[in-house]
């Protein structure tokens, strides 16, 4: 009878790890490798922050080593802004919140989202990564999701808005649960913990006295 609650808890923790990875992994990958269109005013703010994430159009121009006769004619840049690496969106939000070194912090956030979500899925240093993911989830919920919902009450949300809110609410609460309870089994943390315990004391336990 004692095994059933333990199995149920482990399954719950596995599902929590899976949901955390599903929410944060795409967000981190998009921030690091994706692009977004920024307005001219936002582009000026990004340049004023000294962001090393240059516009992708300029990066492609630098890497174009074809002869001039083989290069295609450059397309006119749209009037609505310039494409920058998507993590600059995070940097702009951090700058609006008066966070020091917003570009550096934005890089850290994106890397934690990407690497941390994979680590949590594998159950590797779960508590180390789950805690900052919970903070990132809470900040995203407050600074991105809530304004996207129009600061309206839940019964006025559309189905898409409800799914967005539910995803990031889970991305905030589940890492907290994993920080408190650990990853469960199977996980790398549990395997390493079992090896450490089995290595203590060495040898078989002493036989009880007759």
Image: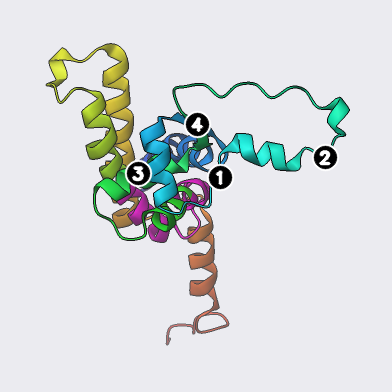
Is 126 magenta? The answer is yes
Earlier sequence position, callout 3 versus callout 4: 4
The residue shown at (28%, 27%) is 166
Disc on res. 82: 4
Q: Residue 37 carries which label?
A: none
The residue segment tinted magenta is 111-136
Q: Earlier in the sequence, mark 3 or mark 1?
A: 1
Disc 4 crowd rating (10 Å Cα; few below 14, some 14-19, many 20+) is some
Magenta: main secondary structure equals helix
Q: Name which of mark 4 and mark 1 comes first in the sequence.
A: 1
Going by the picture, which residue comes out furthest to the bottom?
209
Residue assigned mark 3: 92
- According to the picture, the residue beneath numbered tag 1 turns out to be 54
Pick whichever of labels 2 and 1 is earlier in the sequence. 1
Of circles 3 and 4, which is in front?
Answer: 4
Q: How far apart are marks 2 and 4 (CA)?
A: 23 Å
In the rendered view, would you say 140 is above or below 161? below
Q: Can residue 20 be seen in this view?
A: no
Q: Residue at 37%, 44% (x, y): give it.
A: 45
Among the two numbered marks 2 and 4 on one chain, the one whose residue lies closer to the N terminus: 2
């Amino acid at each position: 009878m004692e095994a059933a609650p333990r199995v149920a808890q482990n399954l719950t923790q596995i599902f929590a790890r899976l949901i955390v990875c599903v929410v944060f992994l795409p967000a981190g990958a998009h921030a690091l490798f994706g692009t977004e269109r920024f307005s001219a005013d936002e582009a000026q703010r990004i340049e004023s922050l000294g962001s090393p994430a240059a516009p992708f159009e300029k990066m492609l121009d630098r890497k174009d080593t074809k002869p001039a006769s083989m290069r295609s004619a450059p397309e006119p840049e749209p009037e609505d802004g310039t494409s920058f690496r998507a993590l600059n969106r995070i940097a702009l939000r951090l700058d609006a919140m008066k966070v020091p070194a917003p570009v550096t912090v934005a890089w850290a956030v994106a890397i934690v989202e990407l690497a941390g979500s994979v680590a949590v899925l594998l159950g590797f240093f779960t508590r180390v990564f789950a805690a900052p993911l919970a903070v990132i989830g809470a900040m995203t919920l407050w600074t991105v999701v809530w304004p996207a919902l129009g600061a309206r009450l839940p019964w006025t949300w559309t189905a898409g808005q409800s799914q967005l809110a539910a995803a990031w609410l889970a991305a905030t609460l589940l890492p907290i649960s994993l920080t408190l309870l650990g990853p469960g089994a199977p996980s790398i943390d549990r395997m390493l913990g079992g090896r450490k315990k089995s290595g203590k004391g060495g040898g078989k336990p002493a036989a009880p006295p007759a």
